[in-house]
Image: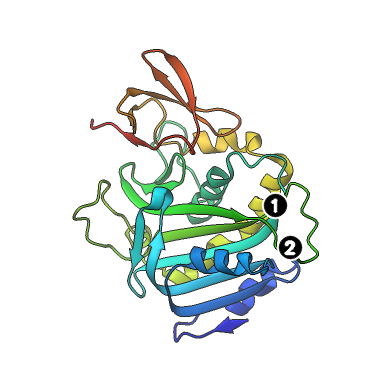
């Protein structure tokens, strides 16, 4: 366990909660790093594929999906990556399962049917939004082949799950989506508190996904799906209406040519202006 910062992080309690699920698990918290995902991928290419949580208070070269930059100042965001060997029967929908786990941990109770939508919604394929139109955070998942070691690879790989959540409000100039923060929801949710809330259930949910896939999560995701029944614009310029998700996590979009299943590797999707 390595903690090199002055902020009080619950490293010991996190280790105690997760290590029984991930034998050999370690926790590392650093004051500054270019990117937690980049660092764990560097290590994986060197054959370091043990389960680890890597947290940094200041991320200087964070990355989002499709190469977008994710920057954060010290204390402004919670930025961490979880690296672990994983052997799911089907990788499809992993980022959706991760997002759902985080949303459920931060807002476990949903509004009564007909009384409104959840404050934390999920925007396919890897974003968490607050109150329908402001971005709270994002997820970046990368995988690496095992290099040496004694891991039983099978269909498994070393997966690095990076999560960034805004803790404090940040300027929104130049951003397509206005930013939101956890402190908008609950003034008690600083970075250490949010990490303690999110991490143990996340590990358990990832392991459940590896056994069962995304299909059992479809109904719960639908309760937080902010795109369903909304007009969307695909990155190739076409327009359509989001129709929910398939059992494999593909976004179903009704276009002029019919309903199409869109996968995260093909295009990005954003709501049309309303």
Quarter the N terminus occupies: bottom right
x and y percentages locating residue 245 in the rendered image = 52, 29
* Residue 86 sits above or below residue 133 on the image: below
Q: Which mark is residue 234?
A: none
34 and 83: which one is in front? 34
> Of marks 2 and 1, which one's residue comes earlier in the chain?
2
The image quadrant of residue 75 is bottom left
x and y percentages locating residue 112 in the rendered image = 47, 37
Q: Residue at x 42, y 75 (%)?
A: 57
209 and 133: which one is in front? 209
Q: Which mark is residue 21?
A: 2
Q: Residue at x 61, y 75 (%)?
A: 27
x and y percentages locating residue 132 in the rendered image = 34, 41
Between the residue at mark 2 and the residue at mark 1, the CA separation in whole angstroms equals 9 Å
Q: Badge 1 is on which residue? A: 207
Q: Secondary structure at mark 1?
A: helix
Report the side of 20 relative to 221 (left or right): right
x and y percentages locating residue 20 in the rendered image = 75, 67
Whether residue 194 is visible? no
Report the side of 31 relative to 208 (left or right): left
Q: Residue at x 38, y 67 (%)?
A: 61
Report the side of 49 relative to 230 (left or right): right
* Residue 139 sits above or below residue 263 on the image: below
Whether residue 62 is visible? yes
Mark 2 and mark 1 residues within 8 Å of each other at the beta carbon: yes
Q: Secondary structure at mark 2?
A: loop
């Amino acid at each position: 366990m390595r903690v090199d910062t002055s902020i009080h992080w619950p490293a010991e309690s996190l280790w105690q909660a997760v290590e029984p699920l991930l034998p050999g698990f370690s926790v590392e918290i650093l004051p500054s790093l270019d990117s937690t995902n980049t660092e764990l991928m560097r290590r994986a290419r060197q054959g370091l594929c043990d389960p680890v949580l890597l947290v940094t208070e200041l991320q200087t070269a964070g990355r989002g999906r499709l190469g977008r930059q994710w920057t954060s100042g010290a204390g402004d965001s919670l930025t961490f990556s979880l690296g672990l060997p994983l052997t799911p029967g089907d990788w499809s929908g992993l980022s959706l399962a991760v997002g759902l786990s985080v949303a459920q941990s931060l807002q476990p109770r949903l509004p009564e049917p007909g009384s409104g939508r959840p404050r934390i919604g999920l925007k396919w394929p890897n974003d968490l939004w607050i109150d329908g139109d402001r971005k709270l955070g994002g997820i970046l998942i990368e995988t690496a082949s095992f290099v040496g070691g004694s891991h039983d690879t099978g269909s498994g790989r070393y997966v690095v799950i990076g999560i960034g959540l805004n803790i404090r409000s940040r300027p929104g100039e130049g951003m397509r989506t206005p930013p939101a923060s956890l402190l908008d929801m609950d003034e008690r949710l600083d970075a250490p508190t949010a990490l303690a809330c999110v991490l143990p259930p996340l590990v358990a949910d990832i392991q459940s996904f590896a056994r069962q896939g995304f299909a059992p999560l479809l109904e719960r995701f639908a309760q937080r799906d902010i795109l369903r029944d909304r007009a969307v614009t695909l990155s190739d310029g076409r327009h359509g209406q989001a129709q929910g998700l398939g059992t494999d996590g593909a976004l179903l979009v009704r276009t002029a040519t019919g309903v199409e299943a869109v996968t995260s590797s093909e295009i990005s999707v954003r709501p049309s202006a309303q």
